[in-house]
Image (tube, helix red, strand yellow):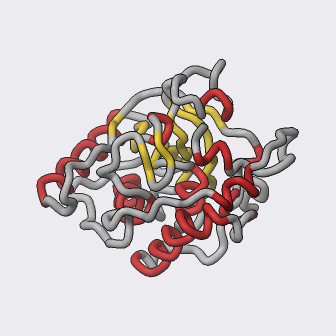
Amino acid sequence: MTTERLRAPLLIGGLTGLALLVGAALPLAPASAEEGGQRLPEAAMTAREKPGLRTATFAGGCFWGVQGVFQHVKGVKNAVSGYAGGSRASARYEEVGTGRTGHAEAVQVTYDPAVVRYDELLQIFFSVALDPTEVDRQGPDTGPQYRSALFPADAEQAAVAKAYIAQLDGAKIFSKPIATRIESGAFYPAEGYHQDYMTLHPTNSYIAVNDAPKLRDLKALFPERANAQPVLVGRPPA
């Protein structure tokens, strides 16, 4: 049983469990020294995107924190937690949590490229949302469902993502190679109780230790790109 499964909320969405009680008692692994906390270089290859809203899917460990970061980025219109890389039939939290479905916990971001391009979203993602050198884990969460991966929507995004990973590896910014994979696969939204979790549960011990620092890093390192108020799934923009 994973740490995240144990910390799922009590009696939310028809599910029961001892999550918050047990999760609060579990020791939380300290964040890696390389996890977020630095503004990485801009991408040398910029995305050439046509006008109109676009989508991009990012996997970087527990989707609560990744969603919370992107919900505060200017130009992001929506950020939905979900599952990518596996089939529709098994895209459910309890099954994905076994690590045997092929899914990664992921966030699908809808954004306006006139405000923030895909390569700029990549810069933010690698800078503050995760430790991209971790393999099949982030912080206290372990298993292939917590892998770091990008699911490009098209060939343009795939090329930009591949080039940026190569750029960061070539610059040897991290002491280990970037483990983020470029994958293909459909995205399936997660259950309602996982949406907007960072905003709705700011005092949750997992959020306070593992995810709140990511949001602080976003605001400190990218003040020109950070919105004070998040764009929430439960309250979409007008």
Q: Is residue 192 left or right of residue 55?
A: right
Q: Residue sitting at 56 percent across and 33 percent down?
A: 187
**Could you tell me residue 221's position as x and y percent?**
40, 77
Q: Is residue 149 left or right of residue 2?
A: left
**Could you tell me residue 196's position as x and y percent?**
70, 57
Q: Residue sitting at 20 percent across and 49 percent down?
A: 177
Q: Is residue 133 left or right of residue 80?
A: left
Between 49 and 150, the one lying in front of the other is 150
Name the quarter where the C terminus is drawn.
Answer: bottom right
Q: Is residue 209 above or below residue 139?
A: below
Q: Residue sitting at 50 percent across and 72 percent down?
A: 213
Between 81 and 100, the one lying in front of the other is 100
**Could you tell me residue 199's position as x and y percent?**
70, 65
Q: Residue sitting at 33 percent across and 52 percent down?
A: 132
Count of numbered circles in the view? 0
Q: Is residue 137 above or below residue 126?
A: above
Name the quarter where the N terminus is drawn.
Answer: top right
Q: Is residue 184 left or right of residue 132?
A: right
Q: Is residue 149 above or below residue 24?
A: above
**Could you tell me residue 31's position as x and y percent?**
42, 64
